Image (cartoon, rainbow, N blue to C red):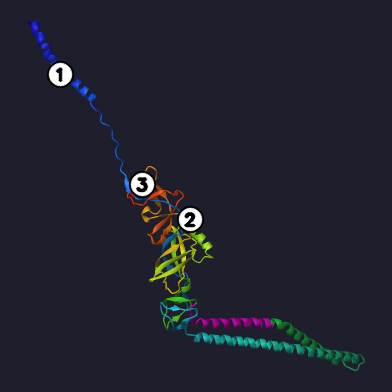
Amino acid sequence: MRDTSRLLSLPSRWLPLAILLAAALITFVLIKTREQPQAQEAGVKRWNVNSIELTPISARPELKLYGQFEAPQLTRLSSALNADVQRIEVREGDRVQQHSLLLELDAREVELQLRQRQSELAAVEARIAAEHNRHRNDLRSLKLEQEVQALNEERVSRAERLHQRTLLSQEQLDNTRLTTRQQALAIRARQQAIADHPNRLAQLHAERDRAQALVDSAQLDLSRTRIQAPFNARIVSIDTAIGNRTRTGDRLLTLYDLDRLQLRAQVPEHLLPILRQGLDSQAGEAEKLSAHAMMQGTSVRLSLARLAARVNAGQAGVDALFTLMDTNVQAVPGQTLSLTLKLPEQSGLYALPPSALYGSNRIYRIVDDDRLQGIEVHLVGQHHPGGQPEQLLVSSAELKPGDRVITTQLPNAIGGLPVKVVE
C-alpha cells in the first residue's frame, strides 16, 4: 500500500515543472518561426530651392558707391599788415570770380610810407648822378693838372740852369721845386679819386637797390590793402568786420576753389587693379571710368580722376577721387552723394540675382548628389540688362559654365546640405 501511494504522488510533484518547460518550448518555437519584418530606409529631408545655370558673359559692371564732396583748396586769407578794415564787398555763401575784390583795408598809412620810400630812392638817384658828374670833372681836371705839371717841370729846369749860372737864388729854386711837388700831390689825389669812382658808384647802386626794394615792399603792402579772390571761389566765412583793426596774420576771409571741388568715395580693394588699368587707358576714352548720380533732381556726370595714395586706418578699401563734369550743378563740401561707377568691360563674368549671394562673397553650387557646395566669389558690380531686374556680376576661378547655383536664400545654408531643385 505504501509503495502504491508513493508512485501516485510523483506526477503531481513534477507536473508544474513539465508545464513550464512545455510553455518555454512553445514560446521558443513561435519566436523562431515568426515572419521577420523587412528593414525600411529612413527618409532624408531635402530643402526646396530654385537654381540658375551659369553662362559666362562680357559686360561693364556698375559699382554703387557713397561719397562726400570736399574742398582740397580751402584757403584762409589773412592780413599782411596792420590796418583798419574799410570795406567788405562779399557775404558768406557768395560765388566770386578770380581777381574779384573781396575786402579793402585803409591804405593811407601805407601810402605815406610809400612816399617816404620813394623820396629816399630819389635822394640816392641824385647822389648817383652827382657821382657821375664828379667823375667827369675829375677826368677833365686831371688832364689840366697834368698840363700844369708839365709847365712846372719846365720852370724847374730853367730855374736849375739859372741857379748854375748864379742868376737865381737857392730859395727861388726851392720854391719852384716845391710848387712842382705840390702839383704832383694834387695829381695823385685826383687820380685816387678817379680810381675810387667804381667803388663809390657800386656803394651808391647798393643803396639805390635797397631803397628800390623798400619802395617795392611799400607798393606790395599797398596792393595788399585790396584783398582779391585768388581763384573762382565760394565764400565760407567772413572773419572780420568793418572798422576792425587788423594785425599781421589776422584772418579775414575763408573760401574754397570751385574748380577743384572733388568727391571722395571708398572702393573695394580687389577692384584696384581694374581701376588702375582703366585710369591708365582712359586718356583716349573720356567715358572709360565715368559715373553718374542724381543731384538736386538732376542727373550729373562725374569722372574718376585718381586714387588716393594711401589706405587710411580703419578702412577696408582705397579712396577714389571724382571730379564733377557738370558745371551747372552747385556742390557743397560735406554733401554726401550716391553714385554709380561704370567699370571697364570684363569677360568671364557670371550674372546672378541678388538672392544668390550669401554675405558679401559666397554662393552655393549644386553638386551631383544634389547637395550644396560653398564657393567664394568676387563681387565685381551690378548689371542692368535691357531693363530687366538688377543682377550681380561675380567672378571666381572655381566656377565654370553649366554649373547650377541656388537662387533661394536658405537660413541654414551650409556645405553638404541636401536640396531639391524646384523649377
Residue at disc 3, secondary structure? loop
Foreground label between 1 and 2: 2
The residue at the point 71 percent across, 82 percent down is 198
> Which is more toward the observer, 168 or 302?
302
Q: Name the residue under label 3.
A: 414
> Which is more toward the observer, 290 or 162?
290
Q: Does the magenta stretch include residue 246?
A: no
Spatial CA distance of label 2 from label 3 is: 29 Å
Q: Is residue 152 positioned above or below 195 on the image?
A: below
Range of residues picked out in magenta: 200-229
Could you tell me residue 105's position as x and y percent? Answer: 47, 83
Foreground label between 2 and 3: 2
Residue 67 is marked as none
Q: Mark 2 points at which residue?
A: 347
Residue at disc 1, secondary structure? helix
> Which is more toward the observer, 35 or 337?
35
The reply to whether residue 335 is in sight is no
Could you tell me residue 8's position as x and y percent? Answer: 10, 10
Residue 19 is marked as 1
Main secondary structure along the magenta-highlighted residues:
helix
